[in-house]
Amino acid sequence: MASQTNSVRRFLVRTAFSKTPWGLFSVVGLSATLAWPVAALPIVRVEGTESASQPPKAAAAAKPVPATSGPREPNELGRFPIVEWHQVVEKDGSYKVSRDRFKAELTELHRRGYVPVNLSEVLDKTLDVPAGKTPVLFTFDDASPSQFRYVERGGQLVVDPTSAVGILMDFIKSHPDWKAKGLFCMLPAAEAGHAFFGDKGIDGQKTEWRFKKVQYLVQQGFELCNHTLWHAKLSKYSDAVVQEQFARGAMAIDSAMPGYKVRGMALPYGLWPKNRALTLKGAWYDKKGKRTVTYAHDAVFEVAGGPARSPFDPQFNPKALPRVPLQGGTNLTTTLNEMDKATGKWARYVSDGNPKTIAKPSVAAAGK
């Protein structure tokens, strides 16, 4: 697909222009000649379980702030949350949330006026959010079977309703003001089934189902993100290995979705490579295919840091986007309560309902 980005003349109408792809050889269109097809990728380890930047733990369960009386004042320079989930399982734990908690977090976000958006809408500054609402970007890291499982019923593959995708799609069906939007940060060749949502019978998932899952997500409206080949700790590797991790990750996605433009990448463990510029673009020589493969990312996701700045904020930096990690020991309500403080440091983005204008906060709110 063509890569486009939209320019915003602040507080005026947006205009679009073309962007030329960087590099020697695009990953687009590689599926027919991949030297490393996903089916042949080795299932390698995920390095360790610790995070370089563990998210802050909630001291105690926070209580939701009561609903405000009257509409919120539009403020499209406010913050919006990029929430981050890993495994959705039976019980909370490190990088895990229970299924009941996942449902409760979706319910709380909906009740408090948040609307899912895609990364492309943030980067292109094309957010079209109903008046009084706030965008939220869902991110799912690691492509585990807990996020997306198939089950066979009557000879047909159906989405397991107890997987994260199943729970989310059911929620959207019962809340039609939400659309299927969000970002899946992909691992094509990691251990424990973290290989396009399941492999070699792990958690009942068959290898041949992997491409179907990737294609299903895109068909529904979700977007895909590069999370490296097998969750490498980028800080410990050479520039050559870092570029191979990104290039082969992009190639794997292309093999499932030919021509797909990967615009974002999430740092495994929140660890930056020694050369940070390689998170945005680089190249790797494929010896088997005898070609140079390039990759380019428009956004880089960190592991924590709180709500992100509005894309209309002059200080918005897509090259280092903070997130709100959700797992055992963290609390979504705490963050949302802070965002509801109109003069706080995390005052929330509130749409005016007009995608052609950018609503500024009042003088009182802006003076925080």
Image (cartoon, rainbow, N blue to C red):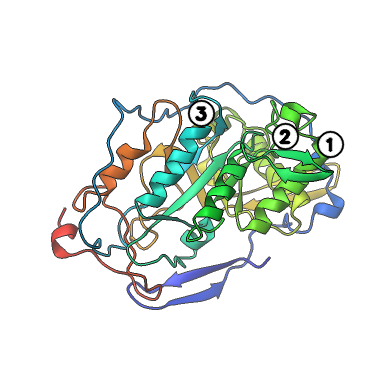
Residue 86, percent from left and from top: 54, 34
Q: CA distance from mark 1 to mark 3?
A: 28 Å
Q: Secondary structure at mark 2?
A: loop
Judge from the rendering whether residue 347 lies leftward or rightward of residue 247; answer left or right. Answer: left
Looking at the rendering, which quadrant does residue 315 occupy? bottom left
Amino acid bearing label 1: Ala
Amino acid carrying mark 2 in the image: Gly
Which disc number belongs to residue 95? 3
Count the marks: how many?
3
Nearer the observer: mark 2 or 1; the answer is 2
Label 3 element class: loop
Point out residue 105 in the picture as x, y percentages from the top left corner: 43, 41
Compared across the picture, whether 222 is left or right of 40 comes to: left
Looking at the image, residue 52 lies above or below residue 187: above
Q: Are marks 2 and 1 in contact (CB under 8 Å)?
A: no
The answer to whether 55 is drawn above or below residue 219 in the figure is: above
Percent coordinates x, y for residue 343 in the rendering: 18, 52
Please indicate, yes or no, whether residue 181 appears anywhere in the rendered image. no
Q: Sort mark 1 into few (<14), some (14-19) or many (20+) by Cα contacts within 10 Å.
A: few
Question: Which residue is disc 1 drawn over?
Answer: 40
Name the mark on residue 198: 2
